[in-house]
Amino acid sequence: MGLVLNLFVQTIVWFGFMGVIIFVAAGTTDYTGGWLYLGVMVVLSVVFGLQMMRVDPGLLKERLKPPVQKDQPLADKLILIPILLLIFGGMAFMAADAARWRWSAMPSSVQWAGCGLLLASLLFIYWIMRTNSFAAPVVKIQKDRGQAVITTGPYAIVRHPMYFGTLFYIAGTSLVLGSWWGLAAIPIIAVLFGIRIGIEEKTLRTGLEGYDAYARRVRQRLIPFIW
């Protein structure tokens, strides 16, 4: 019951905070894109969270931990600051662009297509978590949970599929919120992900047995067939 309560409390707090950012930036609550985005995210977060509680409560417990933790390298804590600022700042910019400044004129059909992209990205991320029970939100070796190298599913294509899926999540968010300009955040955050991947790779290579051999087999880190 404690895990259930934690899931619902964090869902309310997290998306309540995101809602404040979106509607304050938009300057109005009469913003269909904002409500559509929050509705999709709340429903899917609860559904996926409850499913994860049933099949992998250990991972759900890890995912509900804060973004700054004791065993996390200092470099990872530092790189998370610009990543989080860009994500939340970008969300505010998207809402202001679409509803306050009205720079972007986006057809509703594209926004609904964005919902499809958002759903696809979240299903992909859920597949990652079902494949990798050690997909924690921070860089660390989970010795207490017997962490091992995962080589199946999306990990057979790229070494860090969570970041790859997140890029599509950001694209879907921009479209649902109705902002063409929001798509400009994708290459910037891809560069920040590349920096964080370097930090994560160093930790995994030094602390996780078998990771070097896996990295030799799967060459791409973020984008299939490219890098």
Image (cartoon, rainbow, N blue to C red):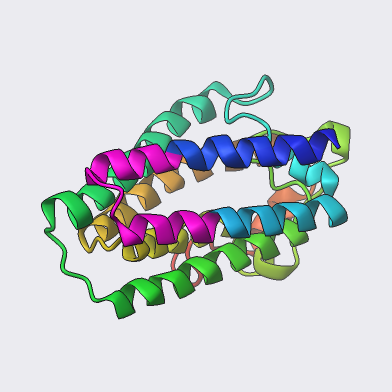
Residue at the spot x=51%, y=26% of the render?
77
In the figure, is residue 44 to the left or right of 5? left
Please provide the residue range marked out in magenta.
18-41
> In which quadrant of the rendered view does residue 201 lie?
top right
At 27% from the left edge and 63% from the top edge, which residue is drawn? Answer: 178
Residues 168 and 180: in front is 180
Residue 202 position in % (x across, y down) = 60, 37
Q: Position of residue 144 (x, y in %)?
A: 87, 32
Q: Is 223 part of what is drawn in magenta? A: no
Is 86 in front, or is 10? Answer: 10
Image quadrant assignment for residue 25: top left
> Was residue 25 drawn as part of the magenta stretch in this picture?
yes
User: Residue 87 vs residue 182: left or right?
Assistant: right
Asked whether residue 150 is in view, the answer is no
Work out whether 113 lies above or below 57.
Answer: below
Q: Residue furthest bottom?
A: 109
Foreground residue among 46 and 224: 46
18 or 162, which lies in front?
A: 18
Return the x and y of residue 100 as percentages of the image width and height.
16, 49
Magenta region, main secondary structure: helix
Q: Is residue 196 visible?
A: yes
List x then y, in percent, for residue 18: 43, 41
